[in-house]
Structure formats: C-alpha cells, structure tokens
Amino acid sequence: MNFIKMQGLGNDFIIIEDYNDKIIENEIELAKKVCHRRFGIGADGLVIIRKSNIADAKMIIINSDGSRANMCGNAIRCFTKYLYEVKHINKEEITIETGDGVKKVKVILHNNYVKLVRVNMGKGSFFGEDVLLKDKNTLIDEEIIINNKAYKLTSLLMGVPHTILINNKGEYSIEDGKIIEKYELFTKGTNVNLVKRIDDNNIEVITWERGAGATLACGTGCCASVVALNKLGMCSNRVNVITLGGHLVVEIINEEVYMIGEANFICKGELLI
C-alpha cells in the first residue's frame, strides 16, 4: 500500500487511498501501527481517502492512539492539497465529506500549485449537549477545580470538542491540558488549548489534542480559540494565530468560521507493515 506523508504547521499525517474499502475492518490497528514514531512511519494521525456520494471525496481521520476524529483543520488542508495536486481534482473550490459534515474548501494557487487552503469550518457551538458536557448547559469563562487547582475554562464544539484556557501569564503548561482532557465533566474527553492574547488581532495557541497528545498545532483548536476569545470580547473577527509549527489566519464572517493556511508534502513510499 502506497502512502504520502504531509504536514500542516507541523501536525503530521500519513495519507492513504482506500476507494474500495479494503482496509475498513483493520483501519484502527493500521493507524496505531503506521503512526508509531519508533515502529512505524510516525505521525499524529492516519488520513484515509474514500469515495463520497455527496462530495468530491471523503476524509477519514484516525488519531495515533486509534481514536477517531470527526474533523481536523490541519488534516483537511493537507487532504485538499493532495486532491488537487495528486488526484488532479483541478477545481478552485472542492467539497470534502467529513464526520462533521461536508466542508467547502478553496485553493489559493501559485504557479499552479496549492499555496494556501481556505476552509469553511462552519459555526462553533457552546451548547453543552454538543460539547458533550456532563450535566451542564454551557461552560463559558467558568472556574473549574481539578485536583485542587483552579482553571477558568470555556468549551465549544468546533468540529470536535475544544476547551480554552487563557494563559496570558504563562501560569499553565501543556501538562494541564493532559489533566483537563480526561476530567469527568467532559464525557468524551476534550482538546485543550492554552491561549495567550497578544492584541486584538494576534494570539498564540498551544494545543493538547485528545487522542494525540501535545502537537505543534491544531487547526480546529486555532479556530475554537478565536471563536471563544471573540465571544469573550478579547479579539477581533480576523486573527493571526501563532502556533509552535507556524501560523494560521482565522476569520469569522456572519458566525461562519474560515481558516486559511498552508499544507506541505514530506515524503512518499510503500507501507510494509
């Protein structure tokens, strides 16, 4: 089986094609094997391309620990570049079926190559039933005590559940994300984003990803951070988001969230495991 490895802001993925559903019964174990950084190729997740009846292609995302993700912002940019440059879906607007519905993406070209990808990420939701909170309607700028430590948290669904923790003074570390992810309030776990506000148009985000751990960047996490800070009156509608792996632009237009960023190829080869 052939593969291509790609990355978006250092968030890396193994991409394989499975148009005939040949690996569907073994895809979880395959993901854990190929994503292992000692015994496999090494990646944050496995991305599978399948046929779609409602879009140009279907994207399946499996995290490195074998858990599934409905959506991933960095992965969908890589997926889009793959469709345009490898599968020759030569349209400036491409539709992709995900676990979070059909996403509309636009390629921004330079010399006939994909320079940037603009993704309509949909709307964020603060409803507790969407975030899968235990016995709470919302969690917005609320202090929660976990292991005798206070955290002021805001949670929302941005394709997948995200929880925002303001970290302007650097008082929290990525290890706090690991603790918050598994807290009983989040019945299916949560991604955790430590956010430093620079000004209205610039923020820094460090993400602990549910199912993958600490990553260099998280596209849905960047979007969720902007939506949360915008709701709290802490940023504008268009924000440059700085991550450990690079930066994205996130824009809110009529409550719709748009993410603009790069995606890049790393290598290609043949799976032997």
Image (tube, grey):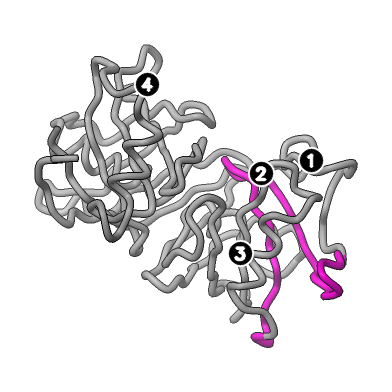
The answer to whether residue 115 is above or below residue 125 is: below
Mark number for residue 180? Answer: none
> Left or right: where does residue 34 sit relative to residue 265?
right
**Residue appearing at x 69%, y 54% in the figure:** 182
Mark number for residue 127? Answer: 1
Number of other residues with Cα within 10 Å of mark 3, as a class: few under 14, some 14 to 19, many 20 or more: many
Q: Disc 3 on helix, strand or loop?
A: strand
Q: Earlier in the sequence, mark 2 or mark 1?
A: 1
Q: Nearer the viewer, residue 86 or 143?
A: 143
**Residue appearing at x 32%, y 36% in the figure:** 30
Residue type, numbered disc 4: Glu
Q: Nearer the viewer, mark 2 or mark 4?
A: 4
- Residue 29 in percent (x, y) is at 37, 36
Q: Label 1 to label 3, Cα distance in Å?
A: 18 Å
Mark number for residue 25? Answer: 4
Residue type, numbered disc 2: Leu
Kindly indicate whether the residue at mark 4 contacts the one at mark 2 (C-beta within 8 angstroms).
Answer: no
Q: Earlier in the sequence, mark 2 or mark 3?
A: 2
Number of other residues with Cα within 10 Å of mark 2, as a class: few under 14, some 14 to 19, many 20 or more: many
Give the residue at mark 3.
193
Q: Which residues are magenta?
A: 143-170
Q: Name the dominant secondary structure of the magenta segment.
A: strand
Q: Nearer the viewer, mark 3 or mark 4?
A: 4
On-image quarter of the C terminus: top left
Give the residue at mark 2.
157
Q: Earlier in the sequence, mark 2 or mark 4?
A: 4
Q: Quadrant of residue 59?
A: top left
Q: Nearer the viewer, mark 1 or mark 4?
A: 4
